[in-house]
Amino acid sequence: MTARTRELVGLVLAGLIAGTALATVTLARDAELSPSALTYGGLFLALYLAAHVVVRRTAPYADGALLPLAAVLTAFGLTMNYRLDPSGGRQALWVLIGVAGLCAVLVVLRHDYRVLESYRYLFGVAAVVLLLLPSAPVIGRSVEGVRLWVDLGVVQFQPGELAKICLVVFLAGYLREKREVIAQGRIKDFGPLLAIWGAAMLVIVQTNDLGSALLNFGIFLAMLYVATGRALFVAAGLALFVGGATFLYTAIDRVNQRVTIWLAPWTDEPVYCSQTGELLLRQDCDSYQLVKSLYSIGNGGFGGTGLGEGIFRAPDGAELIPALRTDFIYSAIAQELGLVGAAALVLVFMVFVARGMRIALHAQDGFSKLLAAGLTFGFALQTFVIVGGVLRIVPLTGITLPFVSYGGTSIVANFVLLALLLLVSNRANALSRT
């Protein structure tokens, strides 16, 4: 069976999963099976079949598992977003735009994606500019003290998601060129690298987007290690991270608050509430979201309550978990699908990461290896940070769960990431056949 045939079979299975899940949600809510659910499942399959045709024409030797895995993840996301907000169809629209972006990248770069390396410095500057946009006057928008968004009136987007990809392209190009001298420890060759990365990190800290700061720092260290093989650089980076985290913990109230919520979400005595300025139990104030999320996960148990049967609203209609469709969608999945469903979702992410790293290992040139490794590690770290935050393994940050959480910019950025991995895989497999 060829890779494209495996891909086609996988997409059909993903379409069946999407149709069945949407039908189950509709049945639970309306007590009858709506034909619209099957229609949505058919449209979902048709969309990915169109993407399959484009992949077949532009990247015939690409990995056959990546696109079906992305389809399964978006099926999870569309189902839960529809379940939580039946009137909102914007997530489906963003998936459509994301698949269109995937196809556009494949068509534009089908001959040789390595042309991106020639524009590495431009991508580095673009990453900093994109990260700087939310702090710009007029167009920058702050949500709960974090400047993540750009509001252009007709459209709102989160430039940090696109900046992540630009940063990976810059690092892949620069490290491919300088990896030997960097491995020797020549300080002057670290200059442009540290300048672009340092500027990006300062902008992120200035906008209070600490989740993206952690993500980009992790990508930087991982790609530096892949390029040089020097564990000393990683150790030095981790030491800098510990020192920087300690400083931020003492200097920035938001970081102090997030760590405190992580370590002690429940209190027996009232403590200072940063939201009201009064004395309240922490679980009724600063850690309210996290605590309610943990209760939601616990309520799911082993097998879950069933799709459409979870409890996410109070009797008066108020949301029990604010930002459920974005930061805490994993807790909604864990309640309705239980440990089995939540673990299955994590397994899909793990297989996606494993395939991405396999592509990096099989790539024939340095730029391709670094590009695939950086994109895959960023995808993996982002998944770990958000799932770990919801499960209280690490402090909670406000980043999205790839392909699943509600958010247009995140969806589009991850489809671009997928397209680049398919292109790297296609070239590596094509060369291995010659």
Image (spheres, rainbow, N blue to C red):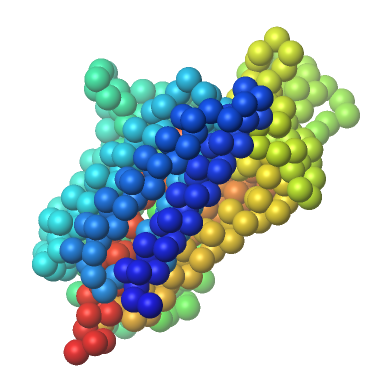
Q: Residue at (24%, 58%) from the top-left corner?
A: 53
Q: Which of the two residues, 86 or 276, is positioned nearer the viewer here?
A: 86
Residue 232 point in image, percent of width and height? 47, 77
Image quadrant occupied by the N terminus: bottom left
Residue 293: tell me if it is visible.
Answer: yes
Residue 399 seen anywhere in this rendered image of the structure: no
Q: Is residue 367 above or below residue 87?
A: below
Residue located farthest toward the bottom when viewing the structure as drawn: 434
Q: Please, is residue 134 above or below residue 368 in the view?
A: above
Front-most of 316 and 229? 316
Horizontal and vertical percent for residue 163?
Answer: 30, 47
Q: Position of residue 123 (x, y in %)?
A: 20, 53
Give me the residue at 34% from left, 36% from top. 94
Which residue is depicted at the point 24% across and 87% down?
433
Indicate the quadrant where residue 222 lies: bottom left
**Residue most extreme to the top:** 316
Left or right: 244, with 174 as reference point:
right
Residue 64 sits in quarter: bottom left
Extreme residue toward the right, this view: 268
Q: Quadrant of the C terminus?
A: bottom left
Q: Position of residue 350 (x, y in %)?
A: 54, 63
Number of disc labels: 0
In this view, 246 is above or below 421:
above
Which one is in front, 234 or 101? 101
Q: What residue is drawn where x is 26% and y is 74%?
A: 61
Relative placement, left or right, of 393 versus 69 is: right
